Amino acid sequence: MSLFSPARHAASGVADPADSPHFWSDGDAGITFTGVGRSFGAHDVIAGVDLTVAPGEVIAILGPSGCGKSTLLRLAAGLDAPTGGSLVIGDAPVRAWDPRCAVAFQEPRLLPWRTLRENVALGLPRTGRRRTAAQDARIDELLELVGLSGFAGHRPRAVSGGMAQRTSLARALARDPHVLLLDEPFGALDALTRLKMQDLLLSVHAASPATILLVTHDVDEALQLADRIVLLGPDDDGAGAPGPARSGAAPAGVRSVHTVPGARPRHRGSADLARMRVDLFTALGVDAH
Ligand SMILES: Nc1ncnc2c1ncn2[C@@H]1O[C@H](COP(=O)(O)OP(=O)(O)O)[C@@H](O)[C@H]1O
Ligand SMILES: [Mg+2]
């Protein structure tokens, strides 16, 4: 059952999300990039990006530093506009900051003077009205989902980095996003916390399958979480492998797309994943042996 299904909402006292204009529903949250490019002055950062993401699909984006991964995510969120091509979510073009999207970054970006609860509340859709009892119940539900019910009244400086990042994830979920855009969301966490956050993201997605674009540096994270892995990078070495991004280098585009075998949660030690890991490292220009 969906976390936000009417039955669950009736039981929890939270309003039926179908009443919310921002509520996602299956089938309307696919993303289509068609020939998308972004230049800053003479610097063509990305060019000719074609990618169709199915509703509810999890796409991991891997690529060298500075190749344009964050730029691509910002375009998808409508935080920036492409200088070429077009970008559509569902059947409506992305024109400006898009209320169907929510974004989480490497740093939790919480307001230090607000409690975790009030930080999560910042993610609620803006209505200009006082918060309703249903919205309060919703925040409680999200805090419980990310395992922070007992810390709702704490301020960010009083909790660990992993807890702050869970708060950031709950804030992103508070708007019932159709599309969740995650820019190296676990990149600053220690290895064990990172694994726990990956599991949390999987359970969040199983309960409420938004379409997810996840930028990560971590090949294993991509293998664990994604339906497909997209390698982004410049095609400037003639061999198809993305080289290091440089100013003046060829613009980045989609170099290859890899469908990850097996249903989630995946066994981290599986032979299929091991083979794909070697393929990905090779494609990234790293010796896997
Ligand atoms: N607002 C901007 N103005 C000028 N250049 C930018 C701007 N945003 C990003 N860039 C450039 O675009 C390139 C890609 O940046 P980014 O998308 O942050 O890379 P990544 O996330 O893959 O590390 C970099 O060379 C960066 O300097
Ligand atoms: Mg980045």
Image (cartoon, helix red, strand yellow):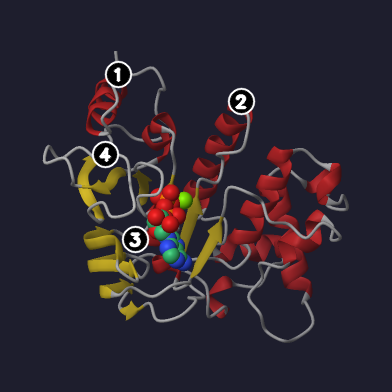
Q: Give the amino acid type for the residue marked by disc 2 in the picture.
A: Leu
The first of marks 2 and 4 along the sequence is 2
The residue labelled by disc 4 is 243
Q: Residue 276 versus residue 16: which sits nearer the camera?
A: 276
Residue 169: x and y in percent read 62, 52
* C-alpha distance separating marks 4 and 3: 31 Å
Which element is circle 3 on?
A: loop
Say if 94 sits above or below 157 in the image.
below
Residue 82's place in the image compared with 45, above or below, is below
- For the residues labelled 2 and 3, the Cα–Cα distance comes to 30 Å
Disc tally is 4
Please report contact status of discs 2 and 1: CB closer than 8 Å, yes or no.
Answer: no
Mark 1 or 3: the one toward you: 1
Residue at figure coordinates x 80%, y 63% from the top left: 118
The residue wearing badge 1 is 288
Badge 1 or badge 3: first in the primary sequence: 3
Of marks 2 and 4, the one in the foreground: 4
Q: Quadrant of residue 16?
A: bottom right
Q: Is residue 119 left or right of residue 241?
A: right
Q: Are discs 4 and 3 less than 8 Å apart at CB?
A: no
**Marked residue nearer the N-terminal end (4 or 3):** 3
Q: Secondary structure at mark 2?
A: helix
Residue at left 70%, top 60%? 12
The residue tagged with tag 4: helix, strand or loop?
loop
Mark 1 and 3 residues: CB-CB less than 8 Å, in contact? no
Identify the residue position indicated by label 2 in the image. 192
Q: Looking at the picture, how far across and down is residue 59, in whole percent? A: 35, 49
For label 3, the residue is: 55
- Where residue 241 appears, x then y in whole percent? 20, 37
Left or right of 18, for residue 34: left
Q: Which tag is nearer the camera, tag 2 or tag 3?
A: 2
